[in-house]
Image (spheres, rainbow, N blue to C red):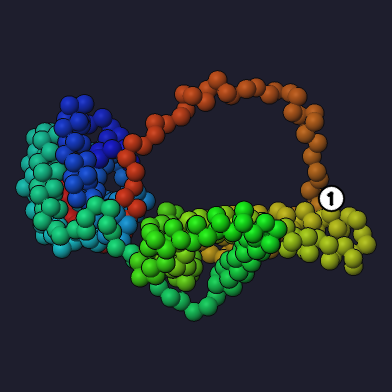
Amino acid sequence: MQDGITDTVGLLSPNDFQSINSKIMALEQSTGAQLSILIINSTEGISIEQYAYEVFNAWRIGRLTVDDGVLVLVALQDRAVRIEVGYGLEGQITDYFARHVINDYIVPFFRAEQYAQGIDKTVDVLIAKIKQEPLPAVGKTPFYIAKQAEPIGVIDIIAAAVIGSALLLFFWGVISAVKSSPIKAGLPVLLIVLLTGYFGGFDLSTGNGMNFGEDFLREDLPRWVQMLFLQIFPSWFSVVMIFMCFITSIMITIGFLFIICYVPSKFIKSAKLKSSLLSGFIFGLFSGVFIGSILRSGILGLFGGLIFGLLITVGFYFGIIKPGNSSHSSSRGSYSRSSHSSSSSSSSSSRSSGGGGRSGGGGASGRW
């Protein structure tokens, strides 16, 4: 996503782009709603509806919890167009209205190859309709967690272990500091607590202003973890605890790996078997994490990691896989690519996501 318009084929002239884009950005500044125009050459065989739905959710168009976003997708070569609407605007921009906009504004102008005029009229009509929706004021979105409560699972146990250890580590550090120098350590802690209370940090009925930006955090973390960090903890403490959880996770992982590597060494005497098992464990661990993250399945990740680790172990033990020596190959045929790095870099986006991104699946499609 670039500005209000992402034109990948250069369909609009600079003047038309600036004129239409200024209207879109003015809408966002006044209402908070996000209207995005995406112009591509082709969806490459994907249906226009599926393509628009995936772009909408990937860009997270609209504000978090409000979902006041609209995407107008134009596939030039396919001669197809789609208006995708977020949950928060489906009351005003109904499927019927979206179809009316396509048939009365986009199709006639596009058939005459007056693309800029068609997009401009469409933007005007959509902006007028969006302004009729009673949206929350800019910067005053309500606190909301989409994740629902679920039965206790493995992720709950892991999260409880990590967060509990992080809390113990944090308070152990604070108590130790207060004991060693009560005045130097106590006054800053007291000041932070007083300021937190003064600015409403202990009001558990509202959020603390934070939100999880990554989809996997919003979708995979248990509801109680999200409420803990986004509602119960003050914002400054949430930031501290996220850092402490990161440190604690590393410590727990190192301890777990130490146990895994140390215990078998007491019972396995063969150095060859030890090195083979260690290699298989390391490769299996990383491959399991990779497979699980790609397929978004812990079971498949565990199964794939076990299979891959077993193959690596057997391969190293029987000599099928041999450690390579890179000292000879690294000195031959090497060259530097640093001189080409600047030419391959892409321009950075000048418009950020609204943080919403839940398309209701509503809207309409058409062809010209």
**186 or 203, which is in the foreground?**
186
Total marks drawn? Answer: 1
Q: Position of residue 284 (x, y in %)?
A: 69, 57
Determine the residue positioned at 46% across, 76% down. 150
| 94 left or right, relative to 185 | left
Determine the residue positioned at 36% across, 37% down. 349
Q: Position of residue 208 (x, y in %)?
A: 40, 61
Determine the residue positioned at 49% across, 24% down. 342
Identify the image quadrant of the N terminus. Answer: top left
Q: Residue 290: in sight, yes or no?
A: yes
Q: Vertical placement of 6 versus 302: above or below?
A: above
On the image, numbered disc 1 is attached to which residue? 319
Identify the image quadrant of the C terminus. Answer: top left
Q: Which residue ends up furthest to the right in the rendered image?
A: 269
Q: Which residue ends up furthest to the front in the rendered image?
A: 183
Q: Which residue ends up furthest to the bottom in the rendered image?
A: 151
Q: Position of residue 118 (x, y in %)?
A: 11, 39
Determine the residue positioned at 53% across, 78% down. 152
Q: Amino acid at mark 1?
A: Gly
| 206 left or right, relative to 21 | right
**Could you tell me which secondary element the residue under label 1 belongs to?**
loop
Task: Using a 10 Å C-alpha cutoff, classify the residue at mark 1 as few (fewer than 14 neighbours), some (14 to 19) or many (20 or more).
Answer: few
